[in-house]
Image: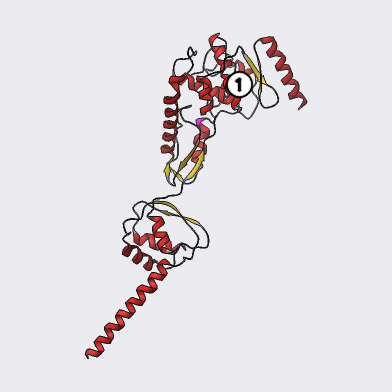
Amino acid sequence: MRKYIYLLLMGSVVFATLFLYLGYRHFHGPGPLAEDRAYYLEPGQGLIRTAWQLDQQGYIDGQNIFKLGVKLSGFERGLQAGEFLIPAGASMQDIMMILSSGKVIQHRLTIVEGWTSWQVADYLNGIDNLTEPITELPREGTILPETYLYTKNTSRHDIIRRMQMRQLDLLDDIWDKRAPDLPFLSVDEALTLASIVEKETAIEQERAHIAGVFVNRLRKNMRLQTDPTVIYGIDRKGFLDRPISRADLKADNPYNTYRIKGLPPTPIAHPGRASIEAVLQPQKTEDLYFVANGDGGHAFARSLREHLQNVRKWRKIEKDK
């Protein structure tokens, strides 16, 4: 009887040792994943559900082995929420270490310089892995267009706040370094002018020159006469599906800088860093006018006579096209 019990115990020990050995090999061996794939571990999700999901979705082939290995390794409460990249062939141990590393996938989004709040909201609402749709537009001109990193299921409102904080950080850095005697007093006015400069040119080297022209016109109490403000006054999206008409230029709205003197009441878009810096450090120039030159840039002029000559050249280029 004792010999039978002894053999039974020895058999159990051998079986347990063999099971642990095979389980260990399985836990550390290559997994079934054929290609790199992202896995999202939801906040508050426990080990049982995680193991089941990994097994069901083909990241591992043995949820019980995974659970046992994680527990024995002391990582049962170390798995973190977030989206993680699982490489092809990752072992269960590899996956355990990845899910406990906190190194979540960083996604990118880019806000284009000169976009309006409507365009920003439309873009963010179209990104599937963000949460909380934007139903109320951010105040025009208050965010800094740049490329931003984010993680899956970040709130769109949190991203908007980050963009606004980035602009405030920039203004804190450069506002006190602005040129003296500028024809505006507040940050809001500077952003309004910067948004106009942003919409007038995409050429970085021109921005300070165009800013200098607008600064000169403001100092002389001349109307800015800039088409982008007229467009924004017609449609807050910031673009039209037709050319500007003479009636548009005569329309009575607070953004029509062919009718009003000075700056419009708000920015007409979100200006980028270069346009904000250009407005705070405008080029010293005697120019009062500019018009497209046909090469993507602008021809500048000091006098109305010279400007009208440039306009005629531009109209000829348009006609030839």
Answer left or right for 242 relative to 54.
right
In this view, 133 is above or below 238:
below
Q: Name the residue under label 1.
A: 227
In this view, 95 is above or below 166:
below
Q: In which quarter of the image is residue 93?
A: bottom left
Q: Quadrant of residue 213?
A: top right
Taking the view exactly as shown, the residue that stands out farthest to the right is: 320
Question: Does the image show residue 73?
Answer: yes
Is 218 a magenta residue? no
Residue at (52, 19) in percent of width and height:
281
Task: Check disc 1: other Cα within 10 Å, few if <14, some if 14-19, many if 20+.
Answer: some
Q: How is the image coloured?
A: secondary structure
Magenta-drawn stretch, dominant element (helix, strand or loop): loop
Taking the view exactly as shown, the residue that stands out farthest to the top is: 220
Question: Disc 1 on helix, strand or loop?
Answer: helix
Percent across and percent down for residue 195 are 53, 24
Front residue of this view, candidates 233 and 191: 191
Residue at (34, 58) in percent of width and height:
46
Question: Does the image show residue 271?
Answer: no
Percent across and percent down for residue 306 are 69, 12
Q: Quadrant of the C terminus?
A: top right
Answer left or right for 176 relative to 119.
left
Front residue of this view, candidates 320 and 80: 80
Percent across and percent down for residue 14 are 32, 80
Percent across and percent down for residue 199 are 58, 25
Q: Which residues are the magenta region?
A: 111-117
Amino acid type, mark 1: Asp
Front residue of this view, candidates 225 and 62: 62
Residue at (65, 27) in percent of width and height:
242
